[in-house]
Amino acid sequence: MERYDHKTIEHKWQERWEQEKSFLVNDKAGAEHYYVLDMFPYPSAQGLHVGHPEGMTATDIYSRYLRLKGFNVLHPMGWDAFGLPAENYAIKTGRHPGELTLENIDNFRRQIKSFGFSYDWSREINTADPAYYKWTQWLFLKFYEKGLAYRKKAPVNWCSSCQTVLANEQIVAGECERCHNTVEQRQMAQWFFKITDYAEDLLKGLDDLDWPVNIKEMQKNWIGKSDGAEVEFGIKNQDKKIKIFTTRLDTIFGATYLVLAPEHPLLNELKTQITNWPEVEKYIKKTQGKTELERKTEAKEKTGVKVEGVIAINPANNEEIPIFIADYVLTSYGTGAIMAVPAHDERDWEFANKFKLPICEVVKPSYDRTALILHGTGAHSKKNWYQWLKIELEQRGYRVLVPDLPNSSMPNLAEWLKALEPYIGYLDEHSIIIGHSLGGPTAIQLIQNLQKRIGALILVAPTSAGMEWKPINSTHPSDQASCIRTITEAPVDWKLVRQNIIRVVGLFSSNDPYIPIEAKELYEHNLPGVYRIFKDRGHFSEKTNELNELPEFFNLPCTELFIGNGTLIQSGKFNSLDSEASKVAIAKEIGAELKTQYRLRDWLISRQRYWGAPIPIIYCEQCGELPVSERDLPVELPMDVDFRPTGESPLVRSKSFHNVKCPKCSQPAKRESDTMDTFVDSSWYFLRYIDPQNTKEPFAKTKIKNWLPVNLYVGGAEHAVMHLLYARFFTKVLADLGYLNFFEPFLKLRNQGLILGEDGQKMSKSRGNVINPDEIVDKYGADTLRLYEMFMGPLEDSKPWNTSSIIGLRRFLEKVNNFSNQFLEGNIKLEHPGPEAETAALRARAQTIKRVTDDIENFRFNTAISTLMEFNNVIISKINISHETKVIDLLTLLILLYPFAPHLTSELWEKLNSNKEVIWQQTWPVYDEFSLLVDTIKIVVQVNGKVRAQIECAADAVESEIIKAAHAEAAVAKYLDGKKIQRTVYVPSKLVNFVL
RNA sequence: GCCGAAGUGGCGGAAUUGGUAUACGCACACGACUCAAAAUCGUGCGGAGAAAUCCAUGAGGGUUCGAGUCCCUCCUUCGGCACCA
């Protein structure tokens, strides 16, 4: 077979798309608009890795598919060009980061083009371009006007040897990654965006998005909403109060001390009252010296200091309680102070135990009642018949205990009682015992001997009950004998039983004629009612009510830490209320304010870096902090910059940049020297693609309506929280400012998984397992690489690279190419076309179209490709077909394959079509539902659930015919011979199952 | 520790609502073509067994006529969060 020359073909078509501007989008085109977006890459010096083309291939397939479906598709690409690596590289080499970045971008663009992606390159953007960051700065000003951008002091990671601020990712185990100096915390004035104003909107907005559940979940956790209350604790002999936040107001009667964060402002205010101030101050200093990382690594052991001389008063019971400071309370969350309830909070519990503080229980578990299941007996001892019952009971608030019981062939009563000893304490007249007899002592005997009064006895007959359950009105001699035997072997004092058991409940399967003998006996001995509970498919039927009628409350000793909700005790007039209800009541009583807290913190956007968009603010000694006026934008990055790290931002050392005239008073002033976090750049880039050339505004409102919100967004899951949350925040702010008419930027999100190295490890230079996509394109071609990356597995899974598997995809293309060429040259001889073969061919084609279309719609590209492979194999092997059919099959295959492998299919399409039409202007094939209909269907025949045969039936055969045929089948008849068929299961057009 | 996802041949994976487990591809083995090799084509390919059959979807149990799929318990891997009161 002749191999096709991928280099020539791919080059030819990429040129043509470029020259004909095939994928430039017209805003005004009438067709339905669809916006397909990739997360734009950071143009690193290493070039693309194989992970990049994965997501991009997926969006390219989808875009090309949608265009064939008649959509007007916007599919742009750009560069997230600001960032740390370029600056670090500049420090090392002395080259300007701008120069380097442009080089990297050229390399990225060349690579991306070599994969044949159908981007509209006329809309390319670059966040480091002044024409772009002018508008990033403009947006900053809008946020500033709205009060959403503000400056405050905040701790930064500081390396005193490098004299620079470090990003979190530059810190390895508490040390600077470059010089291994210990990183410290320093307070510096920093710019923030007030994202917390939008916490609730950001949370609520998630509901309607078509995003992966895990990403939504991560965002929810990040926002971290918790409903609670703010309570003011008084201080003895003082006017001051300490405000705390709690989600467990129900436990306030158990608050035995307060804990303040070491940074809490009140400490300084009360300095004079604190009798052990030196000790307290020492602790404060110690924690301040710690980095966040150190605090986390030392988290195992709780530390703290008691604040002497100041005493707090619990507003719930007016008790005097001590105050502590401890670093397990964070200043950044809530009010920086907590009430400690050691009995019901794990951290407080640990702290209280370490410092020997009182622990007061105020909530006890709402296990109303206990159920004891005795299962270790007889024929059913190994079966977990009680599992479903356990679940049902637990759902009804029972604490279910399952003792480990002796399971010897002849266990005796004494053994059993010994095993049950630890559980006796749990039993009272509200609890129930569930069990059955045989093999061991009967449940009734046990109750007698436990000398405990219990609420009810449930006797169980599992569905598959065997010999131990007898028909209640059986006349069979052996049944009766067994019945008598049970009674004689287990003499029961019915009088005693009656005293001990309040009620007996029989538990039977709905179609089971058997009931426990014990139940029968109990019934006959006038116990208060033998009830039947029916079990149907693992659930109680309506008769379940019987269980709910059982007595209500059951007091349990609570000796351990209990963090769940429950019922209040030792809480004055709130006793016996449940946790939820008591919160509202207590808040009202003590005047606490119900409040919602979020974990989300404001977004720190200041970076003491050069390579980013300057923050457009000027500081004047006279006039203070002033925004740069809009007409002075952009505030351009200066070129005369010294990157060497010193104590301040590199921009401070640029004379041309840093020193300006105050826009108000014209006196000398200084520019803000911090630049913005690169996440600011990427929070609105998807808007700029709409109108990238606009010099008057970031985007025209009228154009926005054409395209946004983004219909499909694809990228790595590493951006699950930060980028996606920030972009959503920007969208909401811009909508509130009237620039946008929607509140969520990305309607549908899909993540591509990580591509691992051939060793199954994450690809990295140090491991030496990095695959360079250029080499793959060179050796196998872009079409092959695209197919391979899609064929590897589900898009969102992480999967290892395997170079030897690539050949299979190349072979597939080779086969398509070869057959097309041979067909064109008349080298394929078709023989004996017949109507059945034509129908079959039509069906195969229709099935292929259906499956490939469904798969693309649902992002199952791996199975789409395997379907195409199967179809190709059919086309190649079936030659008893008419020329016309073969031509249509071939053309259909080419169009279906085109989104995946656009170069080769364009080439073959051109060869097969004498007219000038190109493949990317075709329409996506449709199929006829009738073609999918079949004459005969295959029916699987099972006997007792095991597959024994497969029969062919007419598609319109009725049930009785099919069953008859199944019965007659030799391979089946063999098993049915001489047996009685109890039941026949028939699943239409699928299978028949004979149950013997 | 908590939240989320997943565990299927030698490997990547398939099985859309519970209904023939292992599609498609890689690797491997044998055969054809060739002086030979590569490429290509053909056949085979979960395990045990001569066969009939039996056993296999991380482990154990349950529900069901029937479980990779549903339920319970546990184990492992990956991703995220981690004193959030």
Image (cartoon, coloured by chain):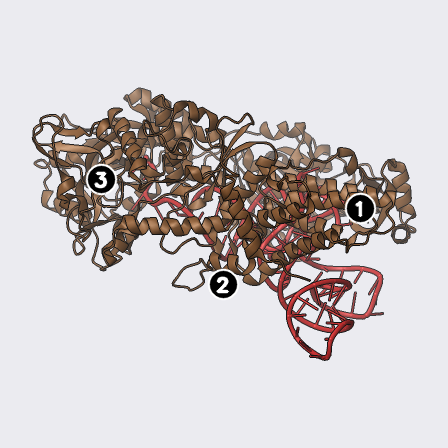
Residue position marked by numbered label 2 in the rendering: A759
Callout 3: SS = loop
Task: Estimate the x, y position of residue A285 in percent, counting from the top left.
Answer: 15, 47
Q: In which quadrant of the rendered view does residue A443 lie?
A: top right
Q: Secondary structure at mark 1?
A: helix
The amino acid beneath tag 2 is Asp
* Mark before the other along the chain sequence, 3 or 1: 3
Mark 3, other Cα within 10 Å: few <14 / some 14–19 / many ≥20: many
**Residue A810: x and y, percent?**
61, 57
Nearest the eye: A254 or A77: A77
> What is the CA distance from the residue labelled 3 to the residue labelled 1?
83 Å
Write down the chain letter for disc 1.
A
On the image, which quarter does residue A616 sit in? top left
Residue holding disc 3? A261
Is residue A422 shown left or right of residue A590? right
User: On residue A883, which mark appears?
Assistant: 1
Give the mark, 1 or 2, whose residue is nearer the N terminus. 2
Dot 2 falls on a residue whose secondary structure is loop
In the rendered view, would you say A893 is above or below A767? above
Instruction: Assess whether mark 2 and mark 1 are in contact (beta carbons under 8 angstroms).
Output: no
**Is A119 placed above or below A732 here?**
below
Residue at the (89%, 37%) spot, across then down: A960
Q: Do we see residue A463 in this rendering? A: no
Drawn colour of chain B? red
**Disc 3 sits on a residue from what chain?**
A
Q: Amino acid at mark 3?
A: Ala
Q: CA distance from mark 3 to mark 2?
A: 47 Å
Chain A palette colour: brown
